[in-house]
Image: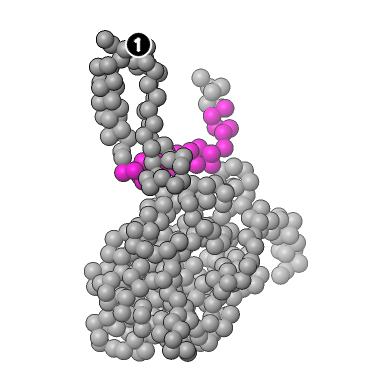
Amino acid sequence: MDLLKYFKKRENSKNVAKERLKLVLVHDRSDMSPHLLEMMKADIIKVISKYAEVEESEIDIKIAKSSDREKKSSSELIASIPIIKAIK
Amino acid sequence: MDKEKMGKAIVITSGKGGVGKTTTSANLGAGLAMMGKTVALVDADIGLRNLDVVVGLENRIVYDIIDVAEKRCKLKQALIKDKRWDGLFLLPAAQTRDKSALSPDQMKEIIDSLKRRYDFVIIDSPAGIEQGFKYSIAGADEAIIVTTPEISAVRDADRVIGLLEASELPSPKIIINRVRVDMVKRGDMMSTEDILDVLAIDLIGTIPDDESVVVSTNRGEPVVSDDRSIPGRSYLNIVKRLLGEDVPMEDVEKQTESKFVKIFKILFGK
């Protein structure tokens, strides 16, 4: 939609740059390529699905900057997996 | 010079090419000499030498760092004494060799010799993270990273910060170069705060983008000696901070001249 494009251009490009940079640095620092992350995601979902029924469309797995500065590593794998019910 | 007191060797590095390492090295060196210190500038970009041209000493090169490393001459013979500033000396890079010609051990020996004779040794590192980077950090006591506010430069700076920490060069500092104040105000360029938010590193100074830097390189006269140049003043502030003076960071928004002042200067001549 043309209108959407107009609004997109309006967003400060430096904010776009900053967000892209943050993401790229998290990947650079943890030496984990987005592709590797995709493969790991698929494996994680497979394993969890053995034990519980999951809402696949709501799954969010990502690498983020460690919230705790004291921790040795600077990156964390954060997985949010909605579980519908256990598989007995 | 006090035998016990060794000079300090600072490597100027970046990862990314073209961000202003050589210009920064030349200006920090000349600035420190202007403040009365003795300085050895070392061009570590073997094969692509440029520090000589930026400082304006290109037609006085007789020997270079590889001649010294391969013992064809004494260190003293290769050092060029600047005629404008007492205490400023340049050790040029070789132009007809490449970075495989120098090892970290050879570099460390040269830097240690220089530290015994000079208050400061400023090492202009080449771009990259390979051999050139490796021998450039050998023998350095401190590191200053130069970046511009662009996404690729900041990314590369992050990589270099990691490498420096791994090689035990403590707490590198950063210089943000080529800041376009108008673009920062518009939201089209990352600000100092944005960059420091992303990189966990201490700031030692910012340099606004300005024509006077190009002109000064054209003439081979480091801009730090021009007190009408805003980048020149910014470089001098960094020099003062290196000497322990508590110079507050410039408010980038106030750094460039207003258009009115520019027009005034054109009409009435500087």
Q: Is residue B266 magenta?
A: no
Q: Nearer the viewer, residue B95 or B37?
A: B37
The kind of secondary structure the magenta stretch mainly shows is helix
Residue B193, given in percent of the width and then of the height, sits at: 57, 49
- Residue depicted at x 61% and y 71%: B245
* Above or below, comparing residue B211 to residue A10 in the picture: below
Q: Nearer the viewer, residue B60 or B159?
A: B159
Q: Where are the magenta residues, as a range?
A: A7-31
As drawn, is B8 to the left or to the right of B246? left
Res. B268 image quadrant:
bottom right
- Residue depicted at x 43% and y 40%: A65
The residue beneath circle 1 is: A85
Chain containing mark 1: A
As drawn, is B113 to the left or to the right of A67? left
Q: Nearer the viewer, residue B258 or B196?
A: B196
- Residue depicted at x 47% and y 89%: B2
The residue carrying pointer 1 sits among few (fewer than 14), some (14 to 19) or many (20 or more) residues within 10 Å by Cα, namely few
Residue B221, given in percent of the width and then of the height, sits at: 53, 75
Screen quadrant of the C terminus of chain B: bottom right
Q: Amino acid at mark 1?
A: Lys
Kindly give the residue lying farthest to the front in the view shown. Answer: A88
Residue B210 in sight in this render: yes
Residue A42 in sight in this render: no
